[in-house]
Amino acid sequence: MPALLLLCAAQFMVILDITVVNVALPSIQTDLGIATADLQWVVTAYTLAFGGLLLLGGRAADLLGRRRVFLAGLALFGGASLAAALAPSTGALLAARALQGVGAALLSPAALSFITTLFADGPERQRALAAWAAVAASGGAFGVLAGGLLTEVLGWQAIFLINVPVGGTVAVAAMRVLPARSPGARGRLDAGGALLACASLVALIYALVEAPDAGWSSPQTLALFAAAAAGVGTFVLVESRVREPLVRLNVFRRRTTVTALVLMLAGMGTVLSAFFFTSLYLQEVLGHSALRTGLEFLPGALLLVAAAHAGGRLVAGVGAKPVLAGGMALGGVGALLLSGVSAGGSYLSDVLPGLLVLDAGIGLAASAIFITATAGVGEEEAGMVSGLTTTAHELGIALVLPVLSTIAASSELLTLGLGDAFRAAALLAFGAALLALVLLRRSDVAAGAEPAFAGH
């Protein structure tokens, strides 16, 4: 239990930093004089470094040792957080945010691979992954609350400074609690594969983040998509030929893992996009303050945590398939309820019912996604699969939010655009539920089966 609490605390800190900055952006802009066009880079610099290096971080944990990579990521994340809080200029802040992303890319997959190896496959690991899923899925909601509270009471610097004592405490505890085992795999780090993976993911994420402003058919967006596709194609070719690949391609022949990765994209994209649009509605339409908005997310965030724990127990009892399908379908219903937001609405009538249903559904599904992704994963692949799972988590946000933002911006009235975006999110969630029904068998995961595609 101490190890699980420690690992979840580290992951919570990483996920929190994705959304905690959003509420503080106006204050940061005023103090540092950041141009409006450059403001998004305070968020994007972190996202690019984090998402682009996750596969490298996961494989490094396998080859160099999980505790060593975990502590290195923690130290870099904490130091970069301090630098961000003390940043005297825009350039210094953006550099610190990028370094935070690098630290997070080492820290997060190493932490998840610890859970995969410290807890035996079955009910014990399922309970641990349910706690992890609760942190991963609810961090966005708690980030809105923490960002509003810290910014209004202590100033925007506090959203970064808080990571320093928390990170230091986690590091000291990790030295005592986490085992310093020898690396689970042997070999050299695939530098070429790491470079290709990083460049491809950065190009893809940057294209998606910039597309709503640059245009989906603009030369910039098309060129970046082409570069990302070429990079992924080259990466697959290289990984199929090197002796010690960054990602063993046969992992994509494991049906449970592949299905879980796709559902991670849809599930995290749906819930965090819903958080973004709900926050926008509460502040821009209803005129609520950042702190009040954060507090209004609290009931749903608490329900999400409870649902994630319940989802882990349900997977052990009835299997992953009904929990995944039911959870994603429930999330779709919640998004449909949110699509009824109106200019004359209120938090209690327009937001809270849909937010609670959405959080309950995605909470249930999140546990099942993590459990399904890591089912049957051995010691030598724990970091690699953890890196893939966390990458899917980040890509879900990077892929879905820009698309839904474009839909929301297509209407002249904000509330009509938000309604369209929520309906699109609902379709995505319902599609994910259908995918779970089609691709998974009822006996998967709960019975300990590890099915694969033909030829595995």
Image (cartoon, helix red, strand yellow):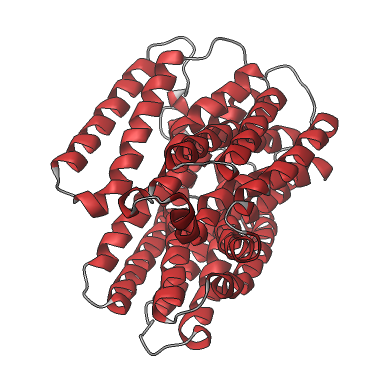
Q: Residue at x 50, y 25 (%)?
A: 56
Task: Tell which of 8 and 74 is nearer to you.
Answer: 74
- Vertical order, 401 against 341 (above or below): above
Q: Position of residue 430 (x, y in %)?
A: 39, 64
User: From this viewpoint, is residue 107 visible?
Assistant: yes
Task: Tell which of 325 and 61 is nearer to you.
Answer: 61
Quarter of the view holding residue 333: bottom left
Task: Tell which of 57 and 386 is nearer to you.
Answer: 57
Q: Residue at x 63, y 74 (%)?
A: 299
Q: Position of residue 101 (x, y in %)?
A: 52, 37
Give the position of the N terminus as an image quadrant: top right
How many numbered dots are placed on residues in this image?
A: 0
User: From this viewpoint, is residue 443 visible?
Assistant: no
Q: Residue at x 46, y 9 (%)?
A: 243
Furthest residue in direction bottom, as rendered: 344
Quarter of the view holding residue 283: bottom left
Task: Tell which of 156 and 317 is nearer to you.
Answer: 156
Q: Residue at x 70, y 58 (%)?
A: 313
Quarter of the view holding residue 44: top left
Q: Position of residue 136 (x, y in %)?
A: 59, 51
- Vertical order, 214 against 274 (above or below): above
Q: Position of residue 348 (x, y in %)?
A: 53, 86
Furthest residue in direction right, as rendered: 176
